Image: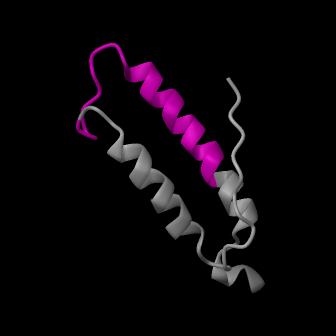
Amino acid sequence: MIIEIEIPDSLPEGHGSSFKKGVAEVLLANATTPLDHTPNGHERSRELGKQTGEVLATEIAKVVKPLDSKN
């Protein structure tokens, strides 16, 4: 499945971390088990989720540059 999202390019420079935290807060609030618990047999799914998170973080960084990107 491919999900398209819009990352607002109107976010001020240096706000990428706050944006990612907002996304993470909502995703974690929808988890049905504690964060440190991975049910038996779900390890592969958790790793796939981490890989997807890495891609998402990279894409957000492309839109919202860190404050020191001018250097």
The answer to whether any part of residue 71 appears in the image is no
Q: Is residue 4 left or right of residue 16?
A: right
Residue 45: in magenta span? yes
Residue beneath the point at 42% across and 50% down: 26
As displayed, is residue 33 above or below residue 43?
below
As displayed, is residue 34 above or below residue 29?
above
Q: Give the percent coordinates (x, y) of residue 41.
A: 34, 13
Instruction: Please name whichever residue, 37 or 20, is drawn nearer the observer in this view of the structure.
Output: 20
Single out the residue that lies furthest toward the bottom. Answer: 71
Q: Is residue 62 left or right of residue 53?
A: right
Instruction: Please name whichever residue, 46 or 9, is drawn nearer the observer in this view of the structure.
Output: 9
Q: Give the percent coordinates (x, y) of residue 65.
A: 70, 72
Residue beneath the point at 28% across and 32% down: 32
Q: Give the percent coordinates (x, y) of residue 59.
A: 70, 53
Residue 28 placement: quadrant? top left
The answer to whether any part of residue 1 appears in the image is yes
Residue 55: in magenta span? yes
Residue 71 placement: quadrant? bottom right
Magenta segment boundaries in residue numbering:
34-57
Q: Give the percent coordinates (x, y) of residue 19.
A: 55, 64
Q: Is residue 26 left or right of residue 58?
A: left
Quadrant in which the N terminus is drawn: top right
